[in-house]
């Protein structure tokens, strides 16, 4: 039984022994000596591991001045006062932070849409919940966090276990040294304050939904376990599956096996000099994954006492000149952009039902492709895309004007890329890693994103690298010559002819000059319309006007010979503080083809017709 020695960077109160004993039993914990928290780790396929879910109601305390973590001289407290979970008789120090009387917040969920008083809240909120646990021999246990926006700190039984920055990627905190048999409790502080040196930075065109926005659970692994693995179809050898497995804590004798039972494909792997186990196995009769045949195979990877059982599809993606080849054949990506906004209830989308509703609408639209903007989406979305056969553009939130000169910001962007790719690298649906959206064209930005692109290629040479660029104009000609294009395999570009510039018919007389012989994806175009608002097609904000934008855009896009995909902006209306127009937007960006309440607008049917008749875009 560990006694927590009271230590507090601020005032060091007298804490009677009974408090310390109670702390050791997890009843309360006060500032204590924290075993050094470990850095969060990436675990591939974490959602495929048996887990003890910690989803549900967590006690919550809103703490706008972060007094639960910082003293009155703004020194960080080792474990803060926030852990005095229950007022005790004879307490001799403040008991403001008493979780036992606090209201709950649902996890997973943003806090903004749970309480009217939190809709605009930007700052720290504390979460706490109890859980029982039974430690096992030779077993490590991680606190798995699907996402916490934007900065987060975690304690178990009063011991700090990790902290994390980044609001859209999953991470895992090793809590093996802090859990004990029986009653335990976890505390989290999540702070959605926006930061100039953040990724993303201060400005975005989406609601700053804060909180434990994706599922939280405990996952158990053996002392030596498979933390990352990559499984893909060889681009050069027919029906050969290759990849690697990394084993954390591998001993020399670790034996690694890879198997696809349905194909009777099985092989053992040998370690390379980086401790990664490489494998390469013939898989006769393999059915390739594609939007028409989203075939997934059970894949079992074992290493010593550890085993992961994943569901993986096998396909290849590459470019040839200005073509995109899926499984060696040219394809046109009939897509739509999607924010992680929950249909109907709004707030962060994070359940299988949310994702199947959104992707079901995309399928109904005639899509084979979705741009999951502007940040990595929940694993539930990627699993749904794998199942439903939708190709995915996944995006790192390097959005608009970051501090591109700041090496710390580059490190944060790389960390989020590591987490995004490390977690989601085996989804057949993902074909494009997007580095950025609409960044200003200057040398610092270009160097920053070139570095990211090189890092992404090193992490995953099996996919294509893209970004959504801005375009410039000379008279009636739009020009794509952003120097960043050199670093990309596929060039994405955003343009809003008919909304932010010119009337819809302006598209009819717009020409395009593309300075790259690479595949193009128009990653955004569109305009706002309030569902149910009707008028002439010259009346902005009406469904008729939005439909007119789409009709004229489609005509223009068909005059861009190397266009190989499109993801108009966007599937569903989403909440944004930049969109206040009363009676029309009411703090929603209304460029959705569907309202947040599921009402399909006229433009939905314009695009659906074009997709169903293959009337827009050519694969070659
Ligand atoms: C930009 C940006 C989107 C934004 C959209 C709009 O291109 O990429 O995030 O929502 O335009 O203005 O609606």
Image (tube, rainbow, N blue to C red):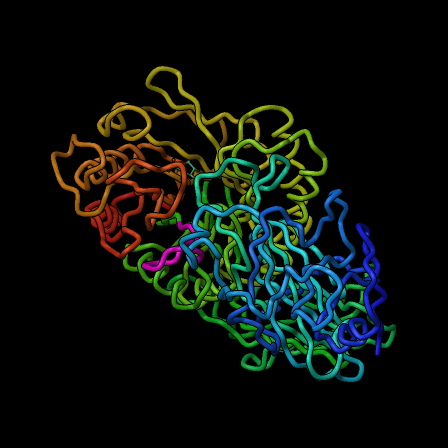
Residue at x 81% of width, y 55% of height = 8
Left or right: 46 as drawn, with respect to 115? right
Depth check: 95 or 570 in front? 95
Q: How many dots with numbers?
A: 0
> Can residue 68 be spotted in the picture?
yes
- Residue furthest to the right in view is 252
Residue 355 falls inside the magenta stretch: no
Q: Which quarter of the figure is the C terminus placed in? A: top left
Q: Which picture quadrant has residue 68?
A: bottom right
Residue 347 falls inside the magenta stretch: yes
518 shown above or below 463: above
Residue 136 in picture, x, y percent from top left: 75, 84
Q: Which quarter of the figure is the N terminus placed in? A: bottom right
531 shown above or below 408: below
Depth check: 76 or 525 in front? 76
408 shown above or below 147: above
Ligand 1 lies in quarter: top left
Residue 433 in picture, x, y percent from top left: 55, 48
Residue 74 in picture, x, y percent from top left: 73, 43
Left or right: 58 as drawn, with respect to 388? right
- Residue furthest to the top in view is 475
The span shown in magenta is 338-348
Depth check: 373 or 34 in front? 34
Residue 617 in picture, x, y percent from top left: 33, 42
């Amino acid at each position: 039984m560990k006694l927590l020695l009271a230590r507090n960077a601020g005032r060091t109160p007298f804490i009677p022994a009974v408090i310390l004993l109670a702390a050791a039993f997890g009843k309360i914990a006060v500032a204590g000596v924290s075993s050094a928290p470990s850095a969060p780790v990436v675990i591939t396929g974490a959602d495929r591991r048996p887990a003890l879910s910690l989803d549900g109601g967590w006690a919550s305390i809103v703490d706008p001045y972060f007094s639960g973590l910082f003293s009155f001289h703004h020194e960080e407290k080792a474990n803060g006062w926030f852990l005095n979970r229950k007022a005790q008789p004879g307490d001799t120090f403040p008991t403001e932070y008493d979780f036992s009387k606090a209201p709950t917040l649902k996890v997973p969920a943003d806090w903004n849409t749970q309480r009217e008083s939190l809709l605009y809240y930007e700052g720290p909120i504390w979460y706490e919940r109890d859980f029982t646990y039974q430690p096992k021999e030779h077993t490590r246990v991680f606190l798995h966090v699907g996402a916490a926006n934007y900065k987060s700190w975690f304690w178990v039984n009063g011991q700090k276990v990790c902290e994390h920055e980044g609001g859209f990627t999953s991470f895992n905190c090793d809590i093996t040294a802090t859990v004990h048999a029986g009653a335990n409790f976890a505390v989290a502080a999540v702070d959605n304050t926006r930061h100039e040196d953040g990724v993303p930075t201060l400005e975005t065109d989406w609601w700053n939904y804060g909180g434990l926005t994706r599922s939280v659970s405990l996952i158990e692994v053996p002392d030596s376990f498979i933390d990352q693995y990559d499984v893909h179809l060889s681009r050069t050898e027919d029906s050969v599956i290759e990849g690697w497995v990394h084993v954390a804590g591998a001993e020399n004798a670790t034996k690694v096996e890879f198997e696809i039972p349905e194909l009777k494909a099985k092989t053992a792997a040998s370690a390379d000099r980086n401790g990664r186990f490489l494998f390469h196995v013939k898989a006769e009769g393999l059915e390739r994954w594609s939007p028409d045949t989203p075939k997934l195979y059970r894949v079992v990877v074992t290493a010593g006492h550890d085993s992961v059982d994943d569901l993986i599809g096998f396909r290849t993606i590459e470019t040839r000149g200005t073509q995109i080849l899926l499984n060696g054949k040219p394809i046109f990506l009939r897509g739509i952009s999607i924010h992680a906004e929950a249909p109907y209830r709004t707030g962060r989308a994070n359940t299988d039902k949310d994702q199947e509703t959104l992707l079901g609408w995309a399928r109904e639209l005639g899509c084979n492709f979705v741009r999951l903007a502007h940040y990595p989406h929940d694993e539930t979305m990627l699993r749904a895309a794998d199942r439903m056969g939708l190709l995915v553009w996944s995006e790192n939130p390097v959005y608009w004007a970051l501090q591109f000169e700041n090496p710390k910001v580059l490190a944060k962007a790389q960390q989020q890329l590591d987490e995004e790719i490390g977690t989601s690298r085996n989804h057949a649906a993902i074909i494009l890693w997007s580095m950025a959206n609409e960044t200003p064209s200057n040398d610092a930005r270009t160097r920053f994103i070139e570095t990211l692109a090189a890092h992404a290629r090193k992490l995953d040479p099996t996919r294509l690298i893209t970004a959504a660029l801005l375009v410039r104009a000379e008279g009636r000609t739009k020009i794509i010559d952003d120097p960043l294009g050199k670093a990309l395999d596929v060039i994405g570009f955003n343009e809003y002819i008919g909304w932010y510039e010119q009337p819809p018919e302006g598209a009819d007389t717009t020409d395009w000059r593309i300075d790259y012989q690479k595949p193009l994806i128009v990653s955004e175009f569109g305009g706002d319309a309030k569902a149910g608002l009707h008028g002439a097609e010259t009346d902005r904000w009406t469904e008729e006007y939005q439909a007119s934008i789409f009709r004229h855009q489609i005509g223009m896009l068909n005059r861009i010979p190397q266009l190989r995909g499109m993801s108009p902006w966007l599937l569903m209306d989403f909440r944004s503080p930049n969109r206040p127009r009363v009676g029309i937007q009411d703090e929603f960006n209304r460029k959705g083809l569907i309202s947040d309440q599921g009402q399909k607008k006229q433009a939905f049917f314009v695009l659906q017709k074009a997709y169903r008749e293959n009337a827009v875009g050519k694969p070659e």
